Amino acid sequence: MSGGVLGVDPGSLKAGYALLDSEGEVVLAGIEPIGRLRERIAEVIAAHPVAMLALGRGTKVRAVAAALEGLGVPLTLVDEFETTREARDLYFSENPPRGWRRFIPTGMQLPPRPIDDYAAILIAKRFLARG
């Protein structure tokens, strides 16, 4: 596959996105309001080689899929079961709690910011794992 996989975690108000190269390394990631998502994804596609859009099959998937169609990149749906929990685990593995928070199990904590971008990373990785 020439180009990366752009994972998208759709939501009601915002969506996470993450571009992974063919080796599964994160090239870029972010969170956009739904109203600006198509524009941001078009910018990413224009700046980087993208072979596939991997869209999480979750909240607002139909509306987001319709918005992303016609960008010149094939789109596929990916199961996003448990991605929120896994995204929280990934966030805390990269950003371990400090101070007194390090004594509280991370499973009992919430990240201090939205983690839709981490969910998008996982969606792209699931697509790559399909082989």
Image (cartoon, helix red, strand yellow):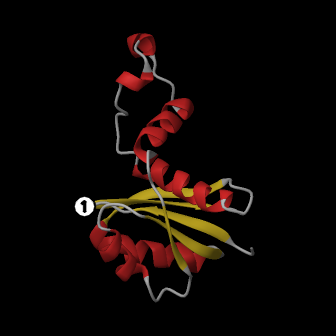
User: Residue 105 is drawn in which quadrant?
Assistant: top left
Residue 56, x across and y down, in percent: 44, 62
Residue 122, x across and y down, in percent: 54, 51
Residue found 46% across the figure and 50% down from its top = 119
**Horizontal arrangement in the rendering, residue 22 relative to residue 123 (left or right):** right
Residue found 32% across the figure and 72% down from its top = 36
* Circle 1: residue type: Leu
**Horizontal arrangement in the rendering, residue 120 relative to residue 67 (left or right):** right
Q: Which residue is mark 1?
A: 13
Say if 115 sits above or below 91 in the image: below
**Horizontal arrangement in the rendering, residue 68 relative to residue 12 (left or right):** right
Residue sitting at the far left: 13
Say if 73 sits above or below 44 in the image: below
In this rendering, the count of numbered labels is: 1
In the picture, the quarter occupied by the N terminus is bottom right
**Horizontal arrangement in the rendering, residue 63 relative to residue 53 (left or right):** left
**Foreground residue, 109 or 128?**
128
Say if 16 sits above or below 114 in the image: below
Residue 40, x across and y down, in percent: 43, 72
In the picture, the quarter occupied by the C terminus is bottom right
Residue 20, x across and y down, in percent: 63, 60
User: Residue 84 is drawn in which quadrant?
Assistant: top left
Say if 70 sits above or below 59 in the image: below
Neighbor class of circle 1 (other Cα within 10 Å; few <14, some 14-19, many 20+) is few
Residue found 46% across the figure and 73% down from its top = 41
| Secondary structure of residue under mark 1 | loop
Residue found 37% across the figure and 34% down from its top = 111
